[in-house]
Image (spheres, rainbow, N blue to C red):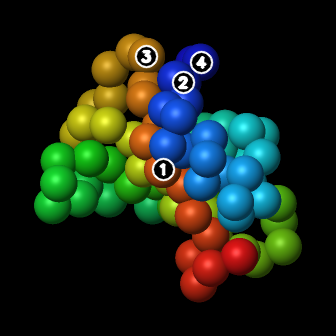
Amino acid sequence: MQPVFTRHVLQRMAQRRIERADVMSVLSEHLHVLPTPEGSTRFDGVPRGDGRVLKVWVVGSPPQTEPMVVKSAAWKGGI
């Protein structure tokens, strides 16, 4: 799976010190998958093993179609 990263998510990742590898880890090994009211899907996971939860939003509802479009990412509780 090679997701597409929007300009928005790339900007947020830079601001929040999130690596592409963090996002890929959450997408492949997540704790939760939640639909959002906006029709997107949120994946929650712990990519670095340090206990911090990373939330990753993708376009669309499950099941995701290829390519998956990542639209935002944030650490739970902030940086």
Whether tag 2 and tag 1 are in contact, CB under 8 A, the answer is no
Query: What kind of residue is marked 4?
Result: Gln
Quadrant placement of the N terminus: top right
47 with respect to 31 (left or right):
right
Q: Quadrant of the C terminus?
A: bottom right
Q: Which residue is mark 1?
A: 72
| Picture disc at residue 67 | 3
Q: Amino acid at mark 1?
A: Ser
Q: Callout 3, which amino acid?
A: Pro
* Position of residue 44 measured from the top left corner of the image (x, y, whole percent): 52, 61
Q: Disc 3 or 2, which lies upstream in sequence?
A: 2
Q: What is the C-alpha distance between the residues marked 4 and 2? A: 4 Å
Q: Secondary structure at mark 2?
A: loop
Tell me whether the residue at label 4 lies in contact with that at label 2, contact meaning CB atoms closer than 8 angstroms.
yes
Q: Is residue 25 visible?
A: no
Q: How would you rate the neighbour count of disc 1 (Cα within 10 Å): few for under 14, some for 14-19, many for 20 or more?
A: many
Q: Quadrant of residue 36?
A: bottom left
Are circles 4 and 3 on residues that touch, CB within 8 Å? yes
Q: CA distance from mark 1 to mark 3?
A: 15 Å
Q: Residue at x 72, y 51 (%)?
A: 14
Label 3, label 2: how far apart the Cα atoms are: 6 Å
Mark 2: amino acid: Pro
**Above or below for 57 versus 61:** below
Kindly identify which residue carries mark 4.
2
Sequence-wise, the earlier of marks 4 and 3 is 4
Picture coordinates of residue 25, whole percent (x, y):
69, 44
- Frontmost of labels 4 and 1 is 1
Judging from the image, what secondary structure is the residue with disc 4 in? loop
How far, Cα to Cα, is label 4 from label 1? 16 Å
Question: CA–CA distance between discs 2 and 1?
Answer: 12 Å
